[in-house]
């Protein structure tokens, strides 16, 4: 059969047949046997963390390729290490961005995702971090982190062969985390949806301290902003606070 005929037959099979969705309680990976190149998908709920390195083209043209590679390696190693330490499942590297899923439906799992983002800001942007000092020898990294929570559908796309396949992540939580992240600018590196904000634990919502008289005080770490998603104006919340990494 010709290439044209093979493609047409496969597309007819995809479009004309039913799509089977299975609800799961784990974040799928590329080798999950439940994902095939047929019409199958796995649906799960999670808090989505999307981090995007800004001005990657400028970095690419400012430095030689080896230096640019080292900056990306340091950036991604930092993100992955922190996400994994708090139960995040890293997926979908795309050159200068990354998706991390914190599976679950509790305030604790949602707040761990936000704490993870705060720790990333500390390591990449705080003057107390040796990582930032190392990166600044070449270029300080600018980045934005967006978070939302919801149901995500995962399906396998491509065709057989180790270099011909990938997972596709579909859901408003994915798209909204990207849109919110795009709104951010120095010194505000983290933005969260109104749903995430309303479900935060106090630990990642309020900064508690004692004033000069010894009185207990607290301040909300988040400021309110607005963005447009799917043609609707929505509130989101952003912060310049970070979480120290020991």
Image: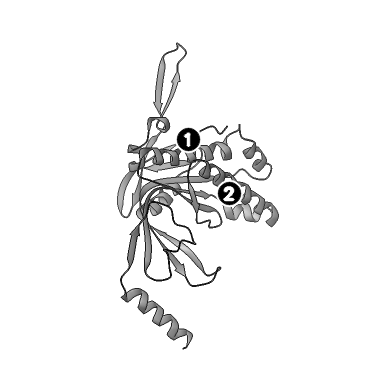
Q: Is residue 108 above or below residue 59?
A: above
Q: Position of residue 101 (x, y in %)?
A: 44, 49
Q: Residue beneath label 2, please?
A: 76
Q: Quadrant of residue 38?
A: bottom left
Which is nearer the eye, 70 or 180? Answer: 70
Mark 2, residues whose alpha carbon is within 10 Å: few (<14), some, or many (≥20)? some
Q: Position of residue 36 (x, y in %)?
A: 43, 68
Residue at 60% from the left image edge and 47% from the top image edge: 77
> Residue 128 location, x and y as percent?
61, 31
Residue 49: percent from left, percent from top: 45, 47
Closer to the N terminus: mark 2 or mark 1?
2
Name the one closer to the observer, 193 or 228. 193
Question: Which residue is found at the position 63% from the left and 39% from the top?
Answer: 131
Residue visible at 31% across and 46% down? 234
In this view, the residue farthest toward the front is: 33
Q: Nearer the viewer, residue 172 or 162?
A: 162
Residue 237, located in which quarter of the rendered image?
top left
The residue depicted at 63 percent of the width and 50 percent of the height is 73
**Mark-to-mark CA distance, 2 and 1:** 21 Å
Residue 7 seen in the current view: yes
Horizontal side of 39 relative to 29 (left or right) equals left
Graded by Cα atoms within 10 Å as few (under 14), some (14 to 19) or many (20 or more), the crowding at tag 1 reads some
Secondary structure under tag 2 reads: helix
Residue 64 appears in the picture as rendered = no
Tell me the SS state at disc 1: loop
Quarter of the figure that contains the C terminus: top right
């Amino acid at each position: 059969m010709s290439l044209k005929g093979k493609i047409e037959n496969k597309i007819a099979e995809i479009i004309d047949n039913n799509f089977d969705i299975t609800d799961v309680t784990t974040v799928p990976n590329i080798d999950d046997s439940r994902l095939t190149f047929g019409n199958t998908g796995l649906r799960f709920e999670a808090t989505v963390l999307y981090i995007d390195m800004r001005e990657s083209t400028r970095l690419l043209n400012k430095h030689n390729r080896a230096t640019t590679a080292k900056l990306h390696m340091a950036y991604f190693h930092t993100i992955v290490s922190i996400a994994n330490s708090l139960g995040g499942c890293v997926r979908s590297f795309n050159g200068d961005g990354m998706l991390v899923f914190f599976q679950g439906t509790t305030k604790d799992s949602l707040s761990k995702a936000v704490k993870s983002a705060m720790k990333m800001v500390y390591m990449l942007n705080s003057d107390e971090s040796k990582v930032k000092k190392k990166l600044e020898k070449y270029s300080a990294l600018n980045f934005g982190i967006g978070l939302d929570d919801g149901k995500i559908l995962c399906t396998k796309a491509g065709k057989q062969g180790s270099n011909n396949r990938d997972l596709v992540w579909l859901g408003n939580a994915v798209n909204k985390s990207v849109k919110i992240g795009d709104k951010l600018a120095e010194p505000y590196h983290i933005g969260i949806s109104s749903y995430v904000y309303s479900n935060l634990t106090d630990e990642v919502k309020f900064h508690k301290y004692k004033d000069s008289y010894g009185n207990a005080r607290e301040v909300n770490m988040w400021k309110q902003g607005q963005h447009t998603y799917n043609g609707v104006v929505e509130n989101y919340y952003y912060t310049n606070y970070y979480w120290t990494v020991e």
